[in-house]
Amino acid sequence: MSPRSLHDPSPDGTVVVDHLSKSFGVVRAVDDLSFTVRPGRVTGFLGPNGAGKTTTLRMLLGLVRPSGGSATIGGRHYHELDHPARVVGAALEAASFHPGRTARDHLRVYAPQVGVPDTRCDEVLALVGLADVAGRRVGGFSLGMRQRLGLAATLLGDPRVLVLDEPANGLDPEGIAWLRAFLRHLAGEGRTVLVSSHVLSEVQQTVDDVVIIAHGRLVHASPLADLARLTTRTVRVSSPDVDGLARLVAERWPTLVVPAEGERPGSVTLQDVDAAQVGAAAFAARLEVHELAVREVGLEDVFLRLTGGGTAGPAGPAGDGGHVAAHRSAAPPGPTPPADTGEPGEPGRHAQPGGAA
């Protein structure tokens, strides 16, 4: 499967979110958000439930009209694309399937809308590992198999951009490993891959770049390697010889002391130092040590610190409030804001061809 460069005149698959904002009544779901997603890389779009991730993706795909700013793909808004499903493949919600249809027939419903022959259905089923069950009814599929079928639907148009909202939901460890390898393969072909998640550990083995938001605002955007540099290691050492410990620290690690409010006398926390070195230095100084404990501040700790450590609260009726993960298909209360989309039923103008059967 190779990217098709002639589907659309847009120059590439670069996604640019520029000062994007969205309010639902008094709720500011997305607040002056800016970031760029580049081709050939897997970008993790991260934040706690309610941070505004799904609302942002819906604006990118023309399903929700922004209150301000813009979101473009290859320099064009989604509604300006001539053949959207051949430029962007997206899965934003848990796909629903007719239980009586086979996997192949499910895709054949959408193939004419996307503008591809039926043979393409078998191609994408093979890509996602469902070739052997193409003739089975979807009603007997596991949740992981349904996730793969939804991904197959996004690939029908051989798009250069993939936008996937929580794609690992429902996958077992083997399925997650397969998904990671598959997304890396797609990025290796030069495609733009944007994957949202509220769990950094779920995507950290897959992504090249991270965009982290909280309360609708950008809190961090960088290559994953740069985020990893924010991780630290601390060593806590305690001794009944308060003065001796103070002298040792002043001599050996005066600049590595971590200020700790309420630290009891005779205890010190050091950063970026090896516990074995601390123990050896204490032994050489004949310092009695009662505690020598290592604490790793990993990527997940950094993520929680950046995002405030928990659920961000409701992000408005259209997107990712705290209960959306459990009730993705529930209709939002109240009137739906007008969407900047194509005509009803126009192929490719929705989140994905197979998003709702």
Image: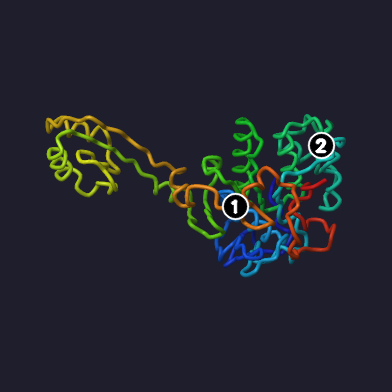
Q: Number of labelled discs?
A: 2
Circle 1 sits in a helix, a strand or a loop, which is it?
loop
Q: Which mark is residue 50?
A: 1
Instruction: Give the side of residue 288 with respect to residue 177, left or right.
Output: left
Instruction: Give the side of residue 351 with respect to residue 220, left or right.
Output: right
Q: Please give the name of the residue rendered at 75% of the width and 58% of the height, measured from the top-left corner.
A: 84
Q: Please give the name of the residue rendered at 52% of the width and 53% of the height, measured from the top-left corner.
A: 212
Which is nearer the eye, 226 or 157?
Answer: 226
Q: Position of residue 42 (x, y in %)?
A: 57, 48
Q: Position of residue 26 (x, y in %)?
A: 62, 65
Q: Amino acid at mark 1?
A: Gly
The C terminus, quarter of image: top right
Q: Residues within 10 Å of mark 1 (few under 14, many from 20)?
A: many
| Tag in front: 1 or 2 | 1
Q: How is the image coloured?
A: rainbow
Q: Is residue 339 above or below residue 324?
A: below
Instruction: Mark 1 or mark 2: name the one nearer the start of the chain.
Output: 1
The quadrant holding residue 242 is top left
Residue at the extreme bottom of the image, as rendered: 68
Tell me, yes or no, if residue 47 can be seen here: no
Q: Please give the name of the residue rendered at 39% of the width and 49% of the height, measured from the top-left corner.
A: 230
Q: Position of residue 204 (x, y in %)?
A: 52, 42
Would you say the residues marked 1 and 2 are in contact, meaning their CB atoms lie under 8 Å apart? no
The N terminus, quarter of image: top right
Q: Which mark is residue 103?
A: 2
Q: Amino acid at mark 2?
A: Ala
Q: Please give the name of the residue rendered at 71% of the width and 37% of the height, measured from the top-left corner.
A: 128
Which is nearer the eye, 149 or 121?
Answer: 149
